[in-house]
Image (cartoon, helix red, strand yellow):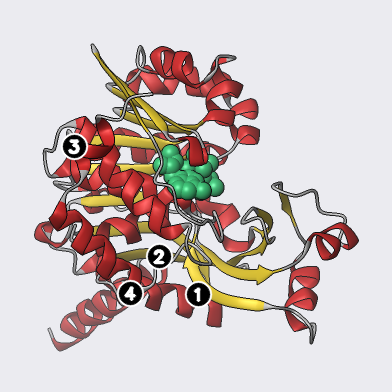
Amino acid sequence: MKKRLLQRSLTAILSIALSTTVFSEEESSHTKENYDILGLGSAFIDYILKVNDEELEEMKYDKGTWGPIEYSSLKSILKKKDTNLINTTGGGSSANVIKGLAKLGQKCAVLGQIGSDEQGSFYLKSLKNIEITPFLHQGSLPTGQALCFVTPDGQHTMRTYLGASHNNDDIKINPNIFNNIKLFHLEGYQLQNPKLFKEAIELAKKQGAKITLDLSSTGIVKTYKDDLLNILPKYVDIIFANEAEAFELTHLYPQEACDFLATFCDVAVVTMGDRGSWVKSGTIKFYTPAVDVKCIDTTGTGDLFAAGFLHGYLNNENLQKCAWIGTFVASKVVQQYGSEVSNELWKEIYAGLDEDKSQEITHNKK
Ligand SMILES: Nc1ncnc2c1ncn2[C@@H]1O[C@H](COP(=O)(O)OP(=O)(O)OP(=O)(O)O)[C@@H](O)[C@H]1O
Ligand SMILES: [Mg+2]
């Protein structure tokens, strides 16, 4: 009898130990009330580096591009004495959106993969600090890390070491983490993990959650065009694309691209940097100008726009108001370095949202 009891407890201990190696402790203690929004993305540490045009040229990086970098090269750039490192934050497109939503008062969770290193712990902390439930799996590679080179004109050039984030297809999803979510946000980069993408999107659909997708990059759109044309009408409720991504997918300029994307999704949003954005949903179509501000760094602009827009959407605001909130939040993140909005700017955002200048801005039609 005693022996059987001992065996049972050993089995229990073993299964707990096994489950914690796959899922974070939050996942096992997850209660349905913890969050309404789940985001899936590649987990990255973002290093924001200030460079001038000559330095960028010396490194042979074309301005505004994204590309891979070896782990050793990334480390050696960071170690250089004259490296102008402005800040280090937990990033990745989906996580930026989720972090924005959390700061706006939504209850959120993030699903992704980190390494078992100090960067992974930093990333986990960056989510926990703002009460995001982390479902972070630990991969065998180092945590993904991105160098964001910001030039004086505010443009950013990215070089990324994918690391653990590249193996998201290895993630074994616990279906329970999708229980009762209202919204599931994905970045286009996850199309590179087709197994995970399909499984996650099906689970979200089963829950009746709204599914929102940011196309992420023209490279992704080019590679996964056929997949996207299948996925969009079947699953996606709200699509976010910048004008280059929208063009890559539709071969149309923003306004017409937005019309076209809205034949697939309930809501289509096409953003055009400092030239504002188009939104189309059924018979509703409108333009929202960007706020005229001094741009320091565009890192995370699209992500914070999406966060603001979705915050409005979750609060049942009309689409004009959603676009205004997105525009307003995005206009703050461009005024600083990096995608993590400072507390000072969040204060300005909260005050601006209370004031609600949405009528003034959206009436200013192009
Ligand atoms: N320089 C700027 N000044 C003010 N607002 C801006 C500026 N750039 C972008 N925005 C706002 O942010 C929105 C999204 O910007 P953008 O089209 O550049 O997204 P994106 O290309 O996805 O950005 P990201 O570089 O994060 O991928 C715009 O529609 C606009 O409202
Ligand atoms: Mg974008």
- Residue drawn at x 57%, y 40% as measured from the top left: 192
Q: Is residue 232 left or right of residue 147?
A: left
Q: Earlier in the sequence, mark 3 or mark 2?
A: 2
In the rendered image, which residue does mark 3 sit on?
Answer: 359
Crowding near the residue tagged with mark 1, few <14, some 14–19, many ≥20 C-alpha atoms within 10 Å: many
Against 103, residue 223 (above or below) is above
Q: CA distance from mark 4 to mark 3?
A: 26 Å
In the rendered image, which residue does mark 1 sit on?
Answer: 120
Which residue type does callout 2 highlight? Answer: Leu
In the rendered image, which residue does mark 4 sit on?
Answer: 343
Q: Dot 3 lies on which element?
A: helix
| Residue 70: image location, x then y, percent | 78, 63
- Residue drawn at x 66%, y 70% as measured from the top left: 49
Crowding near the residue tagged with mark 3, few <14, some 14–19, many ≥20 C-alpha atoms within 10 Å: few
Which residue type does callout 3 highlight? Answer: Gln
Q: Dot 2 lies on which element?
A: strand
Query: Relative to the observer, which residue lies in front, 117 or 46?
Result: 46
Against 281, residue 310 (above or below) is below
Against 18, residue 199 (above or below) is above
The answer to which image quadrant residue 5 occupies is bottom left
Q: Earlier in the sequence, mark 4 or mark 3?
A: 4
Q: Earlier in the sequence, mark 2 or mark 1?
A: 1
